[in-house]
Each structure stands twice: as C-alpha cells, then as structure tokens.
Image (cartoon, rainbow, N blue to C red):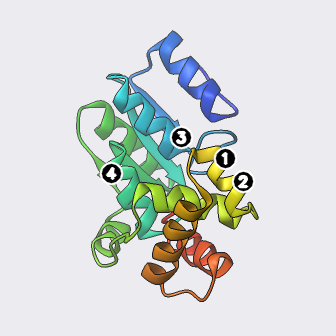
Amino acid sequence: MVGSAHDGPTALRCVEELAPDVLLADIEMPLLTGLEVAAELRRAGSSTRVVIVTTFARPGYLRRAMDAGVAGYLLKDRPVEELAAAVRTVHGGGRAIDPTLAVHAWSEPDPLTDRERAVLRLAGEGQTSAAIGAVLGLSEGTVRNYLSEAIGKVGAENRTEAARIARDRGWL
C-alpha cells in the first residue's frame, strides 16, 4: 500500500503523485464516486488499474464500472483471500468481476443517457429544473425534456420516483 484517500479528488491526486499499479475504490466516495475516478483515470491515460470494492451488488453499477474502464468489481462481503487473489489478478493484467453479478449485469441494460443521468441525479437531490439547468448549462425546457425522457424510460410517475428507481438499479 502506497497511499490512501478519503474522497475522489484526493484519490486522483494520490494516483498522480504515487502512480500505484492498482487503485481500490468504493462506489460511494465523497465529491467524486469511484466510477467517476475510474473514468477520469481512463481519460487521463493512467496506467493504474482500478478495482471497485463495494457493497452495491447492482448490475447497473457493474455496467457503468465496465464502461469507466475498471479492471475489477468485487463485493466487500467476499472472503479476504478472494479479494487478495482478485487484486493479484488485476495487477497481473487480468480482470476480476464478481461472477454472479456479471450474469445479472447483462440482463438489465441501463436505458439512460449520460445527460439524463446527470439531470435525474440532481432532480433526485431535490434541485429545481432552473437549478439543474444552471449547473449543467441547459435551459429549463431542455431539463424538463431530459426529465420526461428519463421518467418514461424507467417507468416512473414523477422525477422523484424516477431518481429512486434509477438509484436502486445502480444507474445513478
């Protein structure tokens, strides 16, 4: 172990400064999620391989993690020997994905676009359409259109229910 971080931005700085072979990250981290950290490392061309270790056994999260370029996705409740073996596999250039979760990940695809996901995440936090538009640089009408599409795609009655459904399925 060469370092530790308490939030996403600190994790990015540690990777930049320490250049670890493998980064263990959680989905839920303050300021930037583990998925956002993985995606940023991928965009930056980092050679550090990312393993998500989480309690979230949701297929949507696994699909998003794979899209972000993670090399491993493991559940925290696995025996420590399995986790250690998975880290060694990733370090050696392989992938380590929880097998049960992998099967389910392909059965329920994420219907949301990145923009619908961003709008829905902010709506789920209680933001108004005007506030969401200000944050994302969109007009209120465009925000309403994205929300309407997201609500329809997840089969919800309103923005709050849509955000809850999407979060429960690992799409946010």
Question: Residue placed at 35% from the left, 29% from the top?
Answer: 43
Identify the amino acid type marked 4: Met
Residue 55 image point, x, y percent = 58, 61
Q: Quadrant of the image for the N terminus?
A: top right
The answer to whether the residues at label 1 and label 4 have Cβ atoms under 8 Å apart is no
Q: Residue furthest top?
A: 17
Question: What's the distance in space between the residues labelled 1 and 3, CA to CA?
Answer: 30 Å
Question: What's the distance in space between the residues labelled 3 and 4, CA to CA?
Answer: 14 Å
Q: Nearer the viewer, mark 2 or mark 4?
A: 2
Identify the amino acid type marked 1: Ala
Residue 4 image point, x, y percent = 63, 26
Q: Earlier in the sequence, mark 2 or mark 4?
A: 4
Relative vertical location of residue 74 with respect to residue 87 in this rendering, above or below: below
Instruction: Please give the residue where the numbered disc 4 appears in the rendered image.
Output: 66
Question: Residue placed at 41% from the left, 69% from the top?
Answer: 59
Q: Quadrant of the image for the C terminus?
A: bottom right
Question: What's the distance in space between the residues labelled 1 and 2, CA to CA?
Answer: 5 Å
Q: In which quadrant of the rendered view does residue 108 lie? A: bottom left
Question: What's the distance in space between the residues labelled 1 and 4, CA to CA?
Answer: 30 Å
Instruction: Please give the residue where the numbered disc 1 appears in the rendered image.
Output: 134
Q: In which quadrant of the rendered view does residue 56 lie? A: bottom right
Which mark is on residue 131?
A: 2
The answer to whether the residues at label 1 and label 2 have Cβ atoms under 8 Å apart is yes
Question: What's the distance in space between the residues labelled 2 and 4, CA to CA?
Answer: 31 Å
In the image, 78 versus 130, the foreground residue is: 130
Relative vertical location of residue 157 with respect to residue 49 in this rendering, above or below: below
Question: Residue placed at 52% from the left, 79% from the top?
Answer: 151
Which mark is on residue 25?
A: 3
The answer to whether the residues at label 3 and label 4 have Cβ atoms under 8 Å apart is no
Q: Earlier in the sequence, mark 1 or mark 3?
A: 3
